Amino acid sequence: MTTTFDHAEALRRLERRLERLRRATPWAIIVVGLALGLAIGRNAGAVTTPSRSTFPVVAALPPMSATGGLDLDADGRLDVAAPVDSNLRGTDAFGSGAFGAARDGGRRQHRGVDLVAAPGTPVRAPISGRVTRVGAAYSDSAALTYVEIANPATRYVARVLYVGSQVTPGTTVAAGDLIGRAQDLAVRYGAGMTNHVHLELTGRSGGRLNPLVILPSMTGERSSATARGVVL
C-alpha cells in the first residue's frame, strides 16, 4: 500500500530530531540538518512512504575531497566547500573578520566571516545550488560585487562579497565550482583593511549561521569558534 509523502510531517520530524540534539555538538546539528534537508528535497515528490533508512543521519564528519569540499549525503557530489583556502581575517584598522564581531561601535554585529584573499584569488561556490543574484556590495558604488547562491532542497543561502563574478543569475553550480575572483578592497578602504572575501550563510529557518562550523579546510578556526561559543 502506498501513501502520499507528507513533506510537512518530515520537516516536523527533522525539527524534533534537531531539538533533541540541540545541546549536543553544534557540528553534529548542522550536518544532520543539511543531510536530512537534502534527503527531504529529493523525496518530496515520491509517492511511497519512506522508511527510516530514507533519511541518512551523518554521525561524523564525512571524508574531505581532494578539493577541500564535503559530500554530506554521500551522493558523490560536494554539498559544501570553502570559497578560498585561507585563514580568518584578524583584527585590522577596520575591525575583526570573525563572526559576531562588533561593528559601528558595538551597535551591530558582523553577520558573516572574512576569509583572507589577495586580489585575483580564485573564489569557489561555498554551497551547491543556483545563482540567484549578482550585484553591487554597496548601494553607493558598483566597484565591489557579490554572488548569492540558494539551494531549494536544503533552504540554505550563501552570499559571497567582494568577488568579481564569472557566473550569472540562473547558473547552477556545485560546491567548489569557480564563481569568480577576489576583488581589491583598496578601491574603497585603502591600505588599512586586509584584503578578503566576506561569506554569509543562512539556514533553513532564515537565521544566520557561523560559516566556520560548516566549511571544511578550516578545522583550527572551527575549533576556536566553537570554544568561544559563537557557532550559531
Image (tube, rainbow, N blue to C red):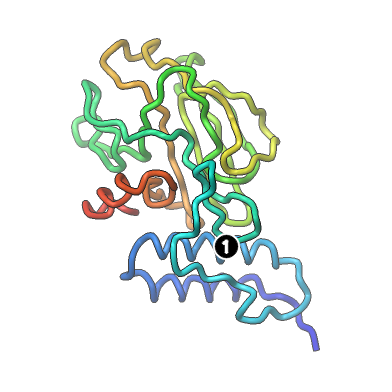
Compared across the picture, whether 108 is left or right of 206 comes to left
Res 190 quadrant in image: top left
Residue tagged by mark 1?
37
Q: Where's residue 188, x and y in %?
A: 37, 13
Residue farthest to the right? 1
Q: 59 or 139, which lies in front?
A: 59
Q: Where's residue 87, x and y in %?
A: 34, 35
Residue in the picture at 43% in, 37% down: 199
Residue farthest to the front? 66
Q: Where's residue 202, x and y in %?
A: 46, 48
Image: 46 above or below 136: below
Q: Where's residue 158, x and y in %?
A: 51, 42
Residue in the picture at 46% in, 24% down: 162
Q: In terms of secondary structure, where does tag 1 sit?
A: helix
Q: Quadrant of the N terminus?
A: bottom right
Compared across the picture, whether 20 is left or right of 102 comes to right
Q: Quadrant of the C terminus?
A: bottom left
Q: 159 or 90, which lies in front?
A: 90
Residue in the picture at 70% in, 66% down: 44
Q: Type of residue at label 1?
A: Gly
Image: 59 above or below 31: below
